[in-house]
Amino acid sequence: MRIIVHKARCQGHARCSAQAPDVFRLDDEGYILPGDIEVGEGEQLLASRGARSCPERALELDRTPAARG
Amino acid sequence: MAVNPVPDHVPPEMVRDFSLFTSPGMAPTPNGDPHAAVACVHSGPPIFYSPCNTRDGRGTWVVTRATDQRRVLQDAETFSSHRSIFSSALGESWPMIPLELDPPAHGVFRSLLNPLLSPKRVVVLEPKVRERAITLIDRIAASGTSCDVMKDFAFPFTVSIFLRLLGLPDHRLDTFVGWAKDLLHGDDVKRPAAAQTIVAFIDELATKRRKEPADDFMTFIVQAQVERRRLTEEEVRGIGVLVFVAGLDTVAAAIGFGLAYLARNLKDQDLLRREPDRIVLAAEELLRAYPTVQIIRVATKDIDFEGAPIRKGDYVSCATMIANRDPAEFECPNTVDLAREDNRHAAFGYGPHRCLGSHLARREIVIGLEEWLARIPAFRIKKATAPITSGGHVFGIENLILDWS
């Protein structure tokens, strides 16, 4: 699974990293680091919860076959 | 309260008799439930015009759906924050910073202040926060089986943390809380007087820290640089006043509303006490159900928004308590479900102005609930007492007398 990060939409709520701190890394101001995120097998549940907790809709789950790859 | 006439461009059929200030349940009410009282707007149109929906009696558009509020709050170009809500009480027009600045100036100050209240920084502050909560609650537990949670815990807890952050002494806590009450809930006489007092106090503190630096927030501000220059006196004041005002009232109210819910719902109270791991998630749900702030923007241009002919200069209200009860966003929005997931609530707003203090506020609420539940046995609202709640610009709870005898 891959998470598409719409960095420009991030407003630093940090709800994602509260759910899954190892998946969603923040900068010193508390905003998401740029770049899409490849999620490992064991982290999928927490990662999708984290993505779904973003109030700004800045994190998009990509479940296309290529992303599952 | 003076009521302005409805502007000509507002279609009469879009005007509704609703206001966060004057609708039923908004005045101070014993055993009131102002959040439930405003949730009734969801049976009506998604956007309407309220002729009297600010403290000074101005009309606003009211955006009810969470998705539409996101659109407004994420679009700072069309919907400006510059309202001088505080300084206008003094007949002045300087902005509270960063709250009342628009991008790009907003981002400059936001970047300056973000690290001071970031999630990482809050981890560093946490032990002191917890220590403060434990001290207060132990004192309450040792002195009897009843207390007024607002006066004895919620206010002293939240305000002292933030006073320490600002570098202010605890012994003036009651004075500061008094100023905040007059400012946020006072009448036309008390409000400007409190504003004057707070400005003078912040100016004086800034002067002091310029001469005698300390390890605190105000010293950081007077020494800080943006765009390779020191901040102006007005900018220092704008930041100082915002941090002072924002920290004084809202977190205490959130803890009060949360504990009032638990006092009335013993099953949930018992569950959280037995399984404290649930408190982090539960705190989000309590924030969803009982947020405290109405956010207002000013239209910078004419725009037709979801059928509403918004014109330049119109006020647009995004009340967090309305978005958080939107049935299109939340299943059974009027039911508190402490295990609710997918809880993208708006208690701290949406968009670039997302509450700067939200990470600290969250930790205070979680720690407050954890330590309270760990130390106080099953509690209820004391017989023959009634918490007084109110609506308005900032929703509040004045008193909450609990009993665990």
Image (cartoon, coloured by chain):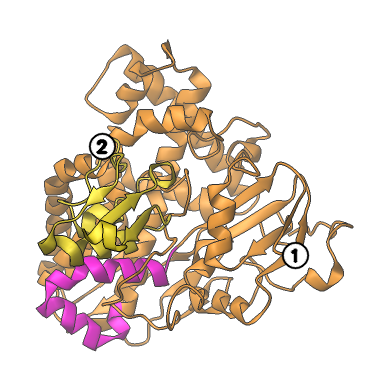
Chain colours: A yellow, B orange
Residue at horizontal 28 percent and vertical 34 percent from the top: B116
Q: Which amino acid does label 1 sit on?
A: Gly
| Disc 2 residue crowd, few under 14, some 14–19, many 20+, Cα 10 Å | some
Question: Does residue B140 lie above or below B79 as drawn?
Answer: below
Q: In this view, does B243 lie to the left or right of B317?
A: left
Q: Is mark 1 on a helix, strand or loop?
A: loop
What span is in magenta? B262-291
**Front residue of this view, candidates B380 and B50:** B50
For label 1, the residue is B307
For label 2, the residue is A27
Where's residue B9, x and y in %?
86, 57
Where's residue B322, x and y in %?
54, 69
Q: In this view, does A57 lie to the left or right of B67?
A: left
Q: Report which quarter residue B208 is drawn in.
A: top left
Subunit bearing disc 1: B
| Disc 1 residue crowd, few under 14, some 14–19, many 20+, Cα 10 Å | few
Residue at horizontal 27 percent and vertical 32 percent from the top: B167
Q: In this view, does B263 lie to the left or right of B371?
A: right
Where's residue A6, x and y in %?
39, 47
Give the prevailing secondary structure in the magenta stretch: helix
**Quadrant, the C terminus of chain B:** bottom left
